[in-house]
Structures are given as C-alpha cells and as structure tokens.
C-alpha cells in the first residue's frame, strides 16, 4: 500500500535548528533571534509538516510565498507577522524563506517565572492559523522592525544578569503592539467581516428555528469557524471585536432567546424545551438559563402569568 503520510520535521532544540541551518551554536539554549537574510538556501519537500517545541514569532518582508492551513491558502506580502505556539503544526507549500525579516524562537522555560509567562497565554493570536497572520501597515512595519532589531541587539550582547529582563521587556512590548495592530486589522476589514457576521447569524438561526438541533446538535464553535476557513480563536476574536461578545456568547444568547420564545409561547415542559435546544440533560439547560437571566426556566415562565 502506498504511504501518503506527509513528512514531518519537528525541531526540539535550538541547537538542532542552528545545526540544520549551518549556524554557530546559539548563545542561549532557550532563546534565539535569526535574520532570514542569513538563512542558506533550504529545500524542503512540498507538503512537509513543520513544528517546534518553541513559541515562534516570524516577521517576513518581501515574501511572495504560500502556506496552507487546513484547506486555506495564504499569500504572504510585505510586512507579515505570524505567531506559533509550541508544537503547533503548519504545512510548507513552496519556498517559505523570505529575503528579509526575523525569526524569534522562545522556549517556554525561558519565560518561566516571568511576567510574560502569564501574559503570553492571553495572546490568542498564538493559536491563529498562518492564514490569519497580521498584515502590517508601512508605519506598523517600521515600528515592529525597530523593536526586533533591539531584541536582536540585546541577544547578541554578552549575557549578564540583566539580559533576560531586557529581552522579556522588549518581547512584551512587541506582543502588546501586535495585539493593538490585530485590533486595527479587524476594524479595517469591517466591510468584509460584516458579511461574515450576517452569515454567522443565519448559521445560528437556521437550526434553532427549523428544529433540527435534536438531530444535528447545537452548532459548535469549531464547526462554525471551519465553515468560514478560520480557526476558532480568530473567529471568536473577530466576533468580539465587532460585537463586544465572543462567538460562544452569541451561541448561548441565541439558545436563550429561543428558550424564552418556547417558554412563553408553548406549553412544552422544561425538559422538552431542553431537548429541542440540544441539551442532553435538562439540568444543564436550566443552569445556563439561570446564569443568563437570573431565573430558572420555570421561574421565568411564572413571571409571564
């Protein structure tokens, strides 16, 4: 039988990465900054899976490459920032090394016990797909490049007791501004996303109002996001930026809205309503209803009389 499995290159140490690239041993075993202009010509098989045990931040300039995440293809342009969590896998398709830019690799142990250890978990863009990279404006690109050059400069200095603190501080600045720029990206693409929001509303309304939930189940965030070729994190952040509420909150709101209609307009029991709305146990439905309205379903029905 023919083996169609994709080859997988996993980097578990910076020493291994530097060796593969023909670079000298990294100054620090848990942190490195590299410039793409120094990379050798690398030939990797198309479709190869790439992953590492590190947080990765890539800043690419002058790149016309393509990567695939799931079924989506993304064309890189000028000034693109991408973020990868440890062990996150992406698929290489075509040449991936740009003529300019930076690669930062950070082992989780490098930031252990620092303020960044907690903060980095709050940046959901580390769970975005490469198709959801941050496209920088000219001004943003200049600022990010300046910060990266400062991080590189500090990384090349002789290590002393202040080295890690300075680098951590600069990384926090980089990530804070990246978060700001992502907010700008969500807002500047508002016309495109307004159409997506309308489709999202329709996606939620159809199963609720056609009573298909008992057979098909409550719409799941992962399935909804996948229908738009987006990751759950990016999709939920997009919805939150435009509505002030997460995608999951919107799903719950729709269910509660439908529950109120059935409680006020039918004589169905609470258990029957819970079943129609996709809840396996009526207690779970009642807990959610109480959380959202401060009433149990029975109490809410009682207020209507």
Image (cartoon, rainbow, N blue to C red):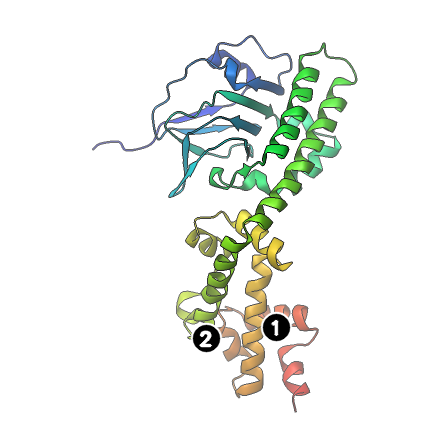
| Residue furthest out toward the top | 24
Q: Is residue 60 left or right of residue 293?
A: left
Where is residue 6? Give x, y as percent.
34, 31
Give the quarter of the image for residue 210.
bottom left
**In-front residue for pair 31/195:** 195
Q: For mark 1, what is the residue? A: 286
| Residue furthest out toward the left | 1
Where is residue 292? Give x, y as percent.
66, 69
Is the residue 197 above or below the residue 79 in the image?
Answer: below
Sequence-first tag of 2 and 1 = 2
Give the quarter of the image for residue 240.
bottom right
Residue displayed at 48% across by 26% down: 62
Task: Give residue 209's mark.
Answer: 2
Residue 42 visible in the shown view: yes
Is the residue 244 above or below the residue 164 in the image?
Answer: below
Residue displayed at 57% across by 59% down: 248
């Amino acid at each position: 039988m023919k083996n169609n499995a994709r080859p997988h290159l996993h980097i578990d140490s910076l020493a291994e990465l530097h060796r593969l690239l023909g670079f000298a041993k990294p100054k620090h075993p848990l942190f490195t900054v590299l410039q793409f202009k120094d990379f050798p010509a690398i030939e990797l098989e198309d479709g190869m899976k790439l992953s590492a045990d590190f947080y990765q931040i890539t800043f690419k300039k002058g790149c016309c490459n393509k990567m695939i995440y799931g079924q989506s293809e993304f064309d890189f342009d000028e000034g693109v920032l991408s973020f990868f969590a440890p062990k996150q896998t992406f698929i290489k398709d075509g040449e991936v090394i740009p003529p300019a830019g930076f690669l930062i690799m950070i082992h989780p142990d490098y930031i252990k016990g620092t303020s960044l250890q907690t903060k980095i978990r709050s940046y959901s863009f580390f769970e975005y797909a490469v198709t959801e990279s941050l496209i920088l404006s000219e001004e943003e690109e200049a600022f990010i490049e300046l910060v990266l050059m400062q991080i590189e400069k500090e990384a090349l200095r002789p290590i002393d007791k202040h080295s890690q603190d300075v680098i951590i501080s600069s990384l926090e600045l980089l990530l804070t501004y990246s978060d700001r720029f992502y907010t700008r990206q969500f807002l500047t693409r508002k016309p495109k996303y307004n159409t997506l929001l309308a489709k999202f509303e329709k996606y939620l309304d159809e199963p609720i109002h056609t009573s298909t939930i008992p057979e098909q189940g409550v719409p799941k965030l992962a399935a909804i996001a996948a229908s738009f070729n987006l990751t759950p994190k990016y999709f939920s952040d997009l919805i939150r930026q435009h509505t002030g509420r997460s995608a999951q909150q919107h799903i719950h709101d729709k269910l509660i809205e439908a529950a109120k209609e059935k409680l006020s307009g039918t004589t169905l029991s609470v258990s029957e309503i819970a079943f129609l709305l996709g809840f396996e146990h009526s207690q779970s439905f009642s807990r959610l209803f109480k959380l959202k309205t401060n009433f149990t379903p029975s109490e809410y029905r009682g207020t209507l009389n």
